[in-house]
Image (cartoon, grey):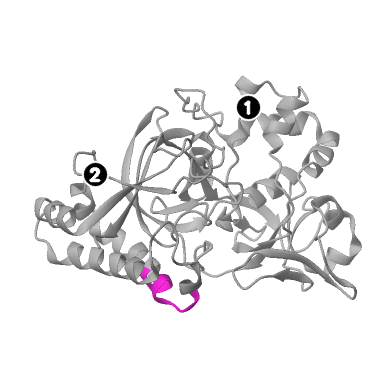
Amino acid sequence: MMMKLAPVSLALALAACATYPPVRVAEPVDYGRPLPAGAEALIKLGPGDRAPDMRSTWFEREEITPALERSASFTRSKHAAQFFPIAGITHARAIASLERFGELLDECGSADEFERRFAAEFDVYKSAGWNGTGGGVLFTAYCTPLLPGSLSPTPEYSHPLHALPPDLVKSDNGTILGQETPSGIRPYPTRDVILRDAAYEPLELVWLKDPLDAYIAHVNGSAFVELPSGKIARFGYAGKNGRPYTSLGKALIKAGQVPAEEMSLAAIRRWGKQNPKSVPGFLAKNQSYVFFTPIEGNPRGSLNVEVTAMRSLATDKSLFPRGALCFVEAELPTPAGPSAPFRQLMLDQDTGGAIRTAGRADIYLGVGPRAERLSGATRSPGQLYYFFLSE
């Protein structure tokens, strides 16, 4: 996700679309399983272990710098200090790592010099991955969908996105505590209750054409809405009700509505058109509900900084350091169809709403239909690395 986009992220069941075939996972492993007891989220590489080739990063420095500066700005803040130490990384080391990396990008006169000096000054860590020993990470993706909608309800546009309710209580670190009532805090109402209860109507921000459009906005944690006038209204993540998330795709497979081998976002869309009366019931199986807020500019992740296409990553923030330098090795689908290697420096700037493991991560792919199609097709096993100044 943002908290995804907090995120909240495209679920594994939405891992393909009609235009782009899914990337098949080579081995039947459980990428969603929790870390084994006592396992560290980050594994430091030794002198003989293979590390990513960093030379391409120097050539991409102008593209990287804005995202890097956003991470540094967050990490320097007093607010960020409460999230450290984590995975053995202190707050001071996290700040120094981001600042020194930026200095090296600026100081070095060639890719070879950058790689040499980076190797001399930085330690490289690998995510513990699905098995706790660096076995790999399954990368999916998320985006900001562009959806048709209206700022007023009409017969055509009747499926709302809601603003954050004033009675929703969060802790200082953003954890959802529940609903404030005269008798105390209780679990917040479920998706089904929120959509049926007239008390939530004053919170309706925008209305979409299709309930599955609203579902996609919730899964991604943000949406740009094209109004009948042609103008674009922008909405970002404001919070969620704290209830458990249930994948629509998995629910459809379990009910025999869509074969597992055919599951994709396009298949869900087709099923919805063929079975419109069944859509609300299946959506209600997911108790989780996301709230939105109007925004300017691009969506913000759980660090409250703008996320950057192909540079912002969403992970489990109970395991990994916020804002950190990281590097993804995977394969991503291309507009032409076949997958291509993806080897790229990223920043850990968001929280995956459905990601609660070291074996999963979400890549932010940007805004609009192309990003939505590509994110729906991304399901790639690979490796995730983190970089911190040597102690």
* Quarter of the view holding residue 187: bottom right
Work out whether residue 329 can be spotted: yes
Classified by dominant secondary structure, the portion drawn in magenta counts as helix
Measured as percent of width and height from the top left, residue 49 is found at 23, 39
Q: Nearer the viewer, mark 2 or mark 1?
A: 2
Q: Which residues are magenta?
A: 72-79
Work out whether residue 334 can be spotted: no
Measured as percent of width and height from the top left, residue 73 is found at 39, 73
CA neighbours of label 2 inside 10 A, class few (<14), some (14 to 19), many (20+): few
CA neighbours of label 1 inside 10 A, class few (<14), some (14 to 19), many (20+): many
Residue type at tag 2 = Gly
Residue type at tag 1 = Met
Q: Nearer the viewer, residue 33 or 247?
A: 33
- Taking the image as shown, residue 13 lies to the left or right of residue 109, namely right
Residue indicated by mark 2: 46
Figure quadrant of the C terminus: bottom left
Q: Nearer the viewer, residue 114 or 235?
A: 114
- Taking the image as shown, residue 290 lies to the left or right of residue 341, namely right
Look at 63% across and 27% down and name the residue there.
263
Label located before the other in sequence (2 or 1): 2
379 lies above or below 229: above
Look at 47% across and 35% down and name the residue there.
131
